[in-house]
Image: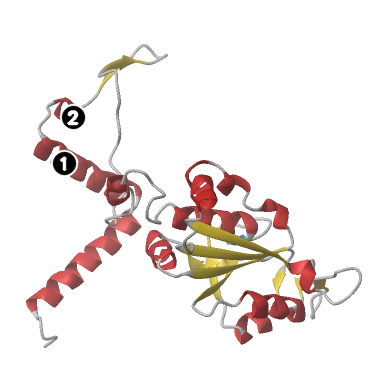
Amino acid sequence: MTAPLWTARVVTVFPAMFPGPLGESLAGRALERGTWSLEVLDLRDFADDPHRMVDDTPFGGGAGMVIRPDVVDRALQTARPAKGRMIYLSPRGRRLDQALVRDLAECPVVVLLCGRYEGVDQRVLDANAVEEVSLGDYVLSGGEPAALCLMDAVVRLLPGVTGNRDSLVEESFADGLLEYPHFTRPAAWTAHDGVERRVPDVLLSGHHAKVAEWRRSEAERLTRERRPDLWASRERSIKTLTEMRQTPNGN
Ligand code: ADE
């Protein structure tokens, strides 16, 4: 078998949570085929006492427990890839977005450190130059569900995992836009509320250029209405690109 295109190396106190949902469907089949590989390290295997303790009380007091630096350090020395990135999933991190997902898909090995309790001793994150990545502005009970989401987003970009490559080009965020609405048969459909809803005529026209134009304008409208933040950052990038093209030598 050829080497996997991408390896996720997960450090966790709950190894049984993996592969979890990623053992099913597209990601699961790709895992079986060896397109990507999942290595799970049980943090407790790196403890140094018979009770396999990984946490301790926080200096300064307060609620909860903190994961010990020595235990995490031993795990990271084992997990550390020759070429790759080490990420700690935490609500304090850089927000995961499609650009970061694309970058991570290019990285042969990604180590994902999952925290529990109040978090991990800061010194071991500093000593290992671990990047922090967040799924969003809410608090999960641990990094494991966040690691699963990150892996799902990366794996579906790997060659051969998502059947139709066009869908990757057209999907939400591919071009900094949300995706246009989708419809299937019947062309006129009456829901439980008694209202007949019709598919936009242009989609039934068979006119490819007009369909593409409609989809584009719907994607732009939805992005402007629902995600003004995305729209503004896209406008800024377009402006910068236009300015760079006008001054090719940077003068
Ligand atoms: N761990 C707990 N909450 C998290 C979040 N929002 N993102 C990533 N990891 C987390």
Above-or-below relation of 2 to 202 = below
Q: For ligand 1, which image quadrant applies?
A: bottom right
Q: Amino acid at mark 1?
A: Ala
Residue 150 is at least partly visible in this image: no
Residue at the top extreme, as displayed: 194
Q: Residues within 10 Å of mark 2 (few under 14, many from 20)?
A: some
Q: Left or right? Give the position of 230 relative to 245.
A: right
Q: Closest to the observer: 22 or 126? A: 22
Q: Amino acid at mark 2?
A: Leu
Question: Which residue is pictured at 53% across the width and 67% down the height?
Answer: 133
**Alpha carbons under labels 2 and 1: distance apart:** 9 Å
In the rendered structure, which disc, 2 or 1, sits on the residue that comes first in sequence? Answer: 2
Question: Which residue is pictured at 59% across the width and 77% down the height?
Answer: 80
Q: Left or right? Give the position of 165 relative to 210.
A: right
Q: Quadrant of the C terminus?
A: bottom left
Quadrant of the rendered structure where residue 213 is? top left
Q: Circle 1 — which element?
A: helix
Q: Left or right? Give the position of 48 relative to 203.
A: right
Checking the image for residue 212, the label placed there is 1
- The residue singled out by tag 2 in the image is 203
Residue at the front extreme, as displayed: 1
Q: Circle 2 — which element?
A: helix
Q: Position of residue 33 (x, y in %)?
A: 50, 50
Above-or-below relation of 207 to 163 = above
